[in-house]
Image: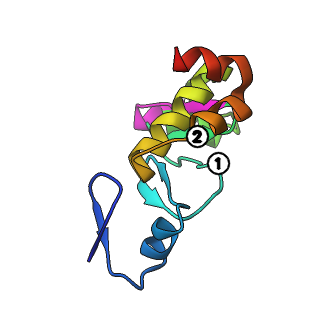
Amino acid sequence: YEALGLDHFAKPGDTLAVAARAGKIRRNFQGYTEDQCETLIGLGPSSISRYRQGHAQNIVATGEYQKAVDSGELAITRGIEFSVEDEARGWVIERLMCNFAFSAVELVDRFGNVGQRLLC
């Protein structure tokens, strides 16, 4: 088995291990993945979805969640929109968790002045 990120292991031929060696693993609510999609849709009460723009959490109480779904309403109880700083910090954290390093040059290239401020 090969160590991946902070707390996962995979057999050397596994697609996750191959992606990790190539520096292409990501981290989401479910753990490490080679899937590059930025959208993760949570289904069911209390689940959390991640979109490129932010997070959304479904209604926690099962009965209230079911009532919203049955009436054709969105079953979301709250959400948060990412700021550019949130995105930059998240990118750094994900790089550290997946690759144990990040590129300061890439941070500034991706996030401009916000990335530069995070380095100070």
Q: Amino acid at mark 2?
A: Arg
Q: Residues within 10 Å of mark 2 (few under 14, many from 20)?
A: some
- In the rendered structure, does residue 16 fall within the stretch colored magenta? no
Q: Which residue is mark 2?
A: 50
Mark positioned earlier in the residue sequence (1 or 2): 1
Q: Which residues are magenta?
A: 54-64
For the N terminus, the quadrant is: bottom left
The correct choice, above or below, for 9 with respect to 36 in the image is below
Q: Amino acid at mark 1?
A: Glu
Q: How is the image coloured?
A: rainbow
Residue displayed at 69% across by 34% down: 73
68 or 51, nearer to the observer: 51
Q: Secondary structure at mark 2?
A: strand
Q: Quick check: marks 1 and 2 in contact, CB under 8 Å?
A: yes
The correct choice, above or below, for 86 with respect to 63 in the image is above
1 or 21, nearer to the observer: 21
Residue 59 visible in this rendered orientation of the protein:
yes
Q: Which residue is mark 1?
A: 38
Residue 6 position, x and y percent, is 30, 51
Residue 75 visible in this rendered orientation of the protein:
no
Residue 33 position, x and y percent, is 49, 61
Q: Name the residue furthest bottom.
A: 13
Q: Secondary structure at mark 1?
A: loop
The correct choice, above or below, for 22 with respect to 73 in the image is below
In space, the residues marked 1 and 2 are separated at their CA atoms by 7 Å
**Number of marks in picture:** 2
Residue 7 position, x and y percent, is 26, 55
Residue 97 in the figure: left or right of residue 108: left
Residue displayed at 53% across by 47% down: 42
Residue 48 in the figure: left or right of residue 35: left
Residue 23 position, x and y percent, is 52, 61
Residue displayed at 64% across by 48% down: 39
